[in-house]
Image (cartoon, rainbow, N blue to C red):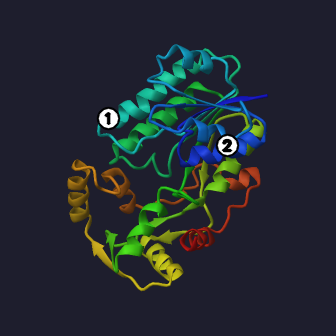
Amino acid sequence: MKSIVIFGGAGFVGKHLIRRLAKCGYKIIVPYQKSTSEEKLRLLGSTGQIIPFYFKNLKDKRIKTILKQINVCINLKTSWSSKKTSFNQTIFEFNEELLNILKKNELLKQVIFFSGLGVDEDKKSLRSVAIHKSENLISSNFKNSIIIRPGIILGGGDQFLSLLLPIFKMSYFIPLFGNGRSKFQPVFIDDVSLLVEKIVKNNLVGNHIFEAVGPNILSYRELYYLISKFMDKKRVFIPLPMKIAKALVGIAEIFSFSPINLEQLSLFERDNVKKEVDKDFNYLKITPQDSIGIIRKTVKN
């Protein structure tokens, strides 16, 4: 039986990965640093299959022992917040320390790292820079490394629509960051988790970058229109210039009541679509599901 460690496994994407990989019979270890319900994580698999535990940092002797015995390491831990520490510390330096431990594991078969579309081109974002540095570090140190660059991930409980829908329900006027023309290519969470399952089950070897996106490319204005249409409610979209939006979000961040932070706001400034960097779902014969259908289902639920 393969043993898999999933950093960030207590989050939205992590829980979906755990459910799918648990059905394959793998032993799954979920280290966490922020408060979480261990019981709920254990219920995602059979008795004793899911092992969550708290760790303060990678110097913890217990986690070092585990990391020297696992077969697959999946890292979803790419923080959006830099309030307490810098992105370079929370993302790049964490990966640097993690990889130094993993190098001592002769049983390790794969390192899977979740990144994001366009991180290699986005030089303005300190978060993107830290993630891209981590990608290069992983690829240069492990012969079987898989980088997954997903589009905005949709599905029940996602961190995107779950923030937008309450605004559409409460307000007739909806702020549209920038001009609303920036495009994105959302992907369904079940397709992303299926991709990871196939990578692990097929023992994929070599260094790969997967751009995990759905079949639909939308502008943010088109997305807003679809949400109001599926809610059967008329809404007026008010363009909010980025300079003003950044100022408002920056102030709101200081007082901890902003639904998004400046890094997340930056997604509205640039296109977030597939760049044909390396591989996509087709490489593992996966047909991604219709994103518009997923949006309709999420809105109506």
The three-letter amino acid code for the residue at tag 1 is Ser
Estimate the x, y position of residue 265 in percent, counting from the top left: 34, 57
Q: Is residue 124 left or right of residue 30?
A: left
Local packing at callout 2 (Cα closer than 10 Å; few below 14, some 14-19, many 20+) is: some
Q: Is residue 201 above or below residue 59?
A: below
Q: Secondary structure at mark 2?
A: loop
Residue positioned most to the front: 39
Q: Is residue 58 above or below residue 166?
A: above
| Circle 2 residue | 44
Which quarter of the image is occupied by the C terminus? bottom right
The three-letter amino acid code for the residue at tag 2 is Leu
Q: Is residue 236 left or right of residue 78?
A: left
| Circle 1 residue | 86
As drawn, the label of residue 114 is none
Q: Is residue 281 left or right of residue 32?
A: right
Q: CA distance from mark 1 to mark 2?
A: 33 Å
Look at 54% across and 49% down and name the residue there.
Answer: 12
Look at 22% across and 48% down and name the residue there.
Answer: 254
